[in-house]
Image (tube, rainbow, N blue to C red):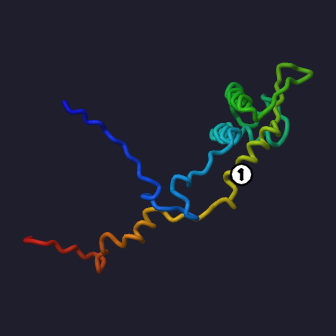
Amino acid sequence: MSSDKAMVTTPSADALGTVQAGLPASAALPPDVRPATAELLKVLADGTRRQIFLVIMRGEFCNCELSEMLGLPQNLVSHHLRKLRQAGFIEEHRDPHDGRWAHITVNLEALSAAWEGLEEALHPSRTGWHAPACQVRAKKLGPAVSPPSSVGSTPKRDGPT
């Protein structure tokens, strides 16, 4: 009984060509964003939560005020505030005169840390230029198939038709 084992091979960096500045293709992957930045992107991916956060960026708000401003049920606002609080991007304290109301503000320290990571990873000055490896290989090997001489022409076939 023969054992057929599936072999998985990955092309070497040399086979893939080189990228900008002569680096092997395997070295081309950028590092991921900071964890705080990833959390900010994740938590603000929801449009309602993003809108709530943008309102809170203006200053301190009461949860009932947010509900009224955004035209959302209080339990939905509370749900999104919980997600923002768990991510660390808002702080909450109870109204000193009426403990039923929670006052919410942005956690500036957490937001600043996430923003630094965002700027570090996604600042427009970090954009670069890279020629696709297939383009580099094609230039080395030459064209594989010549394009037709005129638009709409059909390729000629060998043998009887």
Expressed as whole percent of the image width and height from the top left, the position of residue 44 reads: 67, 40
Neighbourhood count class around disc 1 (C-alpha, 10 Å): few under 14, some 14–19, many 20 upward: some
Residue 54 position by quadrant: top right
Helix, strand or loop at disc 1? Answer: helix
Residue 49 position by quadrant: top right
Residue in the foreground of this view, choosing between 56 and 84: 84
Residue 87 position by quadrant: top right
Expressed as whole percent of the image width and height from the top left, the position of residue 106 reads: 81, 37
Residue annotated with mark 1: 120
Quadrant for the N terminus, please: top left
Residue in the foreground of this view, choosing between 105 and 88: 88
Could you tell me which residue is drawn at 22 percent across and 73 percent down? Answer: 155
Is 129 placed left or right of 139 in the picture? right
Q: Residue furthest left?
A: 160
**Relative to 47, is 119 above or below?**
below
Quadrant for the C terminus, please: bottom left
**Relative to 74, is 131 above or below?**
below
**Relative to 98, is 2 above or below?**
below
Could you tell me which residue is drawn at 85 percent across and 23 percent down? Answer: 94
- Hey, what amino acid is under mark 1? Glu
Could you tell me which residue is drawn at 74 percent across and 30 percent down? Answer: 85
Expressed as whole percent of the image width and height from the top left, the position of residue 98 reads: 88, 20
Could you tell me which residue is drawn at 74 percent across and 43 percent down? Answer: 114
Is 38 placed left or right of 65 in the picture? left
Is 160 placed left or right of 15 in the picture? left
Residue in the foreground of this view, choosing between 133 and 100: 133
Expressed as whole percent of the image width and height from the top left, the position of residue 142 reads: 36, 73
Q: Residue furthest bottom?
A: 149
Residue in the foreground of this view, choosing between 64 and 1: 1
